[in-house]
């Protein structure tokens, strides 16, 4: 396993082609805009070496028997699923941000489960390839990015109907030694500071779309791979110092990139699906289930930090004992813990798949994520309510560092007497960071937009069963238990009242 | 042959579990059915992949955790019954 420092060092050995703000990034590990995202991912490595968190952060590989970072583990029990979300909450608390590594974890688990089923139907050898790849990831303690979302072009058209066929990643050539792929994947979390990229299809496919049914892994610096790092609200504040960002060490959410594959070669040993269009939807659903399971873990860990920041601001401003403030902070806790309940529930209700790996309950995982498209907006609203308008009117760090204005800011932005003004400013900036920027749209769209969860919830819940229950309770259909309880039928029982 | 039928709680069943019981009772006229574990064969009927109905069952049992169609239900049960009769 690698520790945090070794992970950062490992990134310096890679040469990915990355652009941001019109310039080429020379070193992901050292670029001031990207470094906080690197630090957040490094926490996933560092905590694996902290004896306090060893049980949560590490696992024993079922493939090699070796001790591994849990992010490279294939879940072998519901206990593993629970430990995964405990690990995510812990990391959210330690970083106040997205630490990005769950996506690769979910990708290897989804590939493990789906490749087994593909092989069973078609007699292919994907599962063995996936296992060998996972052994490699575990041994080297790598961070693969999981790349699912295609750029999609005209959303009213299927992949095969697009004017430009490259708007979904596809196989353009099959060779003796491998395949050539072309296309792009959007919003890929942690891609720039990963070691590998795992590509999966983004949607269900039809028989004439076999070229889009492709899953594979390539190094981030494979020839033909270009990444364009996305802008975030206030991202260049990172160049101004360590106050205005709010979370200068670990940034906000994951840092997402557009990844372009310009005729990239993938050797056969790294191809995990090649034309099996009828398994595309399964791979998407399994991956989505794993990824939606996460959000009541990581986001709640981040919410813990926001709740703490809000309570600190309340104390620093002398309003901590006001009943409405206590009520609002309690409401924030209630919302966060509700999401936590969802993550735990879908994990405890997980099950063993034919591959032997465990996956969470899909219905409950989708409920988890759907709540995350809503509740963070409410707990952020409450944080802003308690903090006050100053959350968007604070003077800049540069004015605070300027001796001419610092003394004025120190005097007039003072809260309670025994708290330095700088502490108040830092805490308000943290509230701003966690409740205003990229955090909220990430909660909305990360792991799929709300409608994607609604579709899954509708598909996975049995409405007919609920209608039957209602008919029994309403007295439209016979109630066998009532008859046993009373010894006579409902008709006889109620005829006495008429 | 005594067949015991055991259900899970059905929190979020993905299919109408009672269909399996109905098929068995209709097609296996020579068998006796009970809601009991004290039987030659236990048929565990879970509503989802969590499979709660089979969690603490040992011995001779058949487990359903999704709707597989009437034919497959009967094939699975008959195969198990044949196995038991042979032994």
Image (spheres, coloured by chain):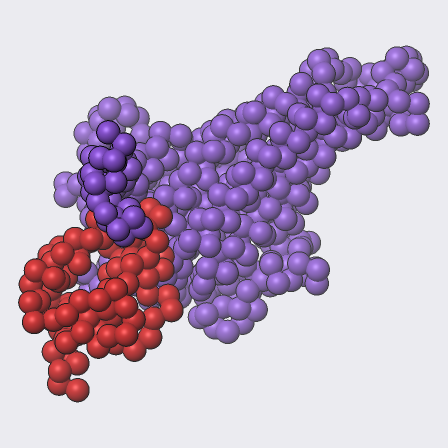
Name which residue lies at 36% across and 60% down: B52
Q: Position of residue A271 (x, y in %)?
A: 32, 55
Name which residue lies at 48% across and 73% down: A64
Is residue A456 rendered to the left or right of residue A379?
A: left
Q: Position of residue A116 (x, y in %)?
A: 29, 62
| Front-most of residues A415 and B64 | B64
Q: Position of residue A432 (x, y in %)?
A: 67, 24
- Residue A349's place in the image compared with A397, above or below, is below
Q: Quadrant of the N terminus of chain A?
A: bottom right
Is residue A484 rendered to the left or right of residue B23?
A: right
The answer to whether residue A330 is seen in the rendering is yes
Q: Quadrant of the C terminus of chain A?
A: top left
Which chain is the one coloured purple?
A
Name which residue lies at 29% across and 48% down: A486
- Residue A130's place in the image compared with A211, above or below, is below
Q: Quadrant of residue A324?
A: top right
Name which residue lies at 66% across and 58% down: A53
Q: Position of residue A304 (x, y in %)?
A: 66, 38
| Front-most of residues A50 and A123 | A50
Which chain is the one coloured red?
B
The answer to whether residue A35 is seen in the rendering is no
| Front-most of residues A379 and A234 | A379
């Amino acid at each position: 396993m690698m520790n945090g420092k070794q992970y950062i060092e490992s990134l310096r050995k890679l040469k990915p082609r990355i652009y941001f703000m019109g310039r080429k990034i020379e070193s992901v590990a050292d670029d001031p805009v990207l470094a906080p995202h690197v630090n957040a991912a490094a926490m996933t490595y560092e905590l694996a070496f902290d004896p306090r968190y060893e049980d949560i952060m590490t696992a024993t590989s079922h493939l090699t028997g070796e001790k591994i970072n849990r992010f490279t583990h294939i879940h072998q029990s519901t206990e593993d699923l629970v430990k995964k979300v405990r690990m995510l909450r812990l990391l959210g608390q330690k970083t106040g941000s997205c630490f990005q590594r769950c996506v690769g974890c979910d990708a290897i688990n989804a590939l493990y489960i789906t490749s087994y089923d593909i092989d069973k139907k078609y007699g292919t050898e994907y599962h063995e390839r996936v296992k060998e790849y996972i052994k490699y990831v575990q041994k080297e303690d790598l961070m693969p990015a999981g790349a699912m979302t295609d750029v999609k072009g005209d959303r009213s058209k299927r992949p095969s109907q697009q004017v430009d066929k490259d708007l979904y990643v596809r196989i353009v050539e099959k060779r003796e030694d491998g395949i050539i792929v072309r296309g792009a994947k959007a919003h890929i979390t942690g891609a720039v500071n990963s070691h590998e990229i795992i590509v999966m299809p983004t949607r269900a496919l039809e028989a004439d779309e076999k070229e889009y049914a492709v899953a594979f892994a390539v190094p981030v610096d494979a020839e033909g791979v270009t990444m364009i790092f996305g802008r975030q609200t206030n991202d260049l504040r990172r160049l101004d110092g360590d106050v205005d960002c709010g979370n200068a060490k670990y940034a906000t959410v994951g840092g997402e990139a557009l990844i372009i594959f310009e005729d990239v070669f993938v050797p056969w040993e790294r191809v995990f699906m090649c034309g099996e269009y009828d398994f595309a939807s399964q791979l998407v659903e399994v991956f989505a289930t794993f990824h939606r399971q996460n959000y009541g873990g990581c986001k709640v860990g981040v919410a813990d930090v926001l709740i703490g920041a809000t309570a600190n601001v309340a104390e620093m401003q002398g309003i901590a004992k006001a009943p409405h403030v206590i009520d609002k902070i309690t409401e924030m806790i209630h919302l966060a813990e509700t999401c936590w309940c969802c993550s735990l529930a879908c994990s405890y209700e997980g099950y063993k798949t034919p591959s032997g790996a465990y996956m969470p309950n899909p219905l409950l995982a989708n409920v988890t994520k759907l709540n995350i498209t809503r509740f963070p907006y409410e707990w952020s609203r409450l944080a802003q309510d308690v903090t006050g308008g100053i959350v968007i009117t604070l003077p800049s760090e540069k004015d605070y560092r300027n001796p001419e204005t610092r003394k004025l800011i120190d005097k007039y932005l003072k809260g309670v007497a025994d708290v330095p003004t700088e502490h108040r400013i830092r805490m308000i900036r943290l509230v701003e960071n966690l409740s205003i920027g990229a955090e909220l749209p990430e909660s909305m769209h990360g792991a799929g937009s709300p409608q994607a969860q609604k579709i899954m919830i509708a598909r996975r819940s049995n409405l007919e069963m609920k209608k039957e229950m209602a008919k029994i309770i309403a007295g439209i259909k016979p109630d066998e238990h009532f008859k046993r309880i009373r010894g006579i039928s409902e008709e006889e029982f109620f005829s006495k009242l008429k | 042959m005594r067949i015991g039928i055991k259900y899970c709680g059905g929190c979020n069943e993905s299919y109408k579990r009672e269909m399996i019981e109905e098929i068995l009772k209709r097609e296996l006229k020579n068998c006796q059915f009970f809601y009991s574990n004290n039987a030659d064969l236990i048929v565990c009927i879970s509503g989802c992949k969590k499979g709660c109905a089979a969690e603490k069952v040992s011995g001779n049992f058949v487990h359903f955790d999704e709707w597989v169609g009437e034919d497959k239900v009967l094939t699975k049960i008959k195969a198990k019954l044949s196995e038991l009769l042979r032994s």
